[in-house]
Image (cartoon, rainbow, N blue to C red):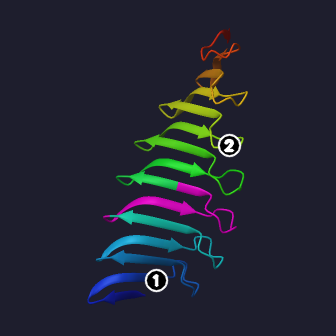
Amino acid sequence: ITHYREGIIFQQEEDTDRDGKMDLWSIYVQGEIARQEEDSNHDGKLDTVYLYQKGKLVKKEMDTHGDGRIDLREIFKNSQLVQRELDTNQDGRMDSWSHYDHGQLTRVEEDLTGDGFYETVYLYLDGKLAQKQEDTDVDRKMDRWTFFEGGEILREELDTDKDGRSDTHSI
């Protein structure tokens, strides 16, 4: 069902799975898509919101657990994914951030303690894990670096004296 105001589209409702219930609502501003809301799992509750600027997708938010809280957020630039945020422990706060460049994963940051600071960082080269950095004592300084090549651990470095530089190496 498409709604018009003064000859310009302002809202559209769709039944994408043809079960007789609307499950996708689109909002238009000056005839251009601005927002979509979707019941993507067809349980009768909205679980996905898409936000657009100048007709291009800029943000997608999802409730993947059906608890009414956003636990997945994706940010787009020029229609390409640049960041994905996750609430992995379902506490209502994002705790994992994945960064993309030209659609390829480059970095993942994880806040495993819920204190608002990430304790683990994964770095990727050409889509493959190259390095893992960890703050093992949760002092907000990385103190363990693990280097990878071909999916295997190449070496590990530790900062045991807390000066911010590695002083112990293992192969």
For mark 1, give the secondary structure. Answer: strand
In whole angstroms, how far apart are the C-alphas of marks 2 and 1?
Answer: 41 Å
Quickly name the residue at label 2: 115
The region drawn magenta spans 54-73
Side of 67 where 131 appears, left or right: left
Q: Amino acid at mark 2?
A: Asp
Residue 78 % position (x, y):
34, 52
Asked if one can make out residue 171 in the rendered structure from this viewpoint, the answer is no
Residue 65 belongs to magenta span: yes
Foreground of the two, 101 or 151:
101
> Mark 2 or 1 closer to N-term?
1
Residue 150 % position (x, y):
58, 24
Q: Residue at x 60, y 33 (%)?
A: 121
Question: Relative to 126, does residue 163 appear above or below in the rendering?
Answer: above
Residue 62 % position (x, y):
58, 63
Which label lies toward us, 2 or 1? 2
Question: Relative to 116, does residue 38 appear above or below in the rendering?
Answer: below
Q: Amino acid at mark 1?
A: Glu
Q: Residues within 10 Å of mark 2 (few under 14, many from 20)?
A: few
For mark 2, give the secondary structure. Answer: loop
Residue 49 % position (x, y):
51, 67
Which quadrant of the figure has residue 58? bottom left
Q: Which residue is most to the left?
A: 7
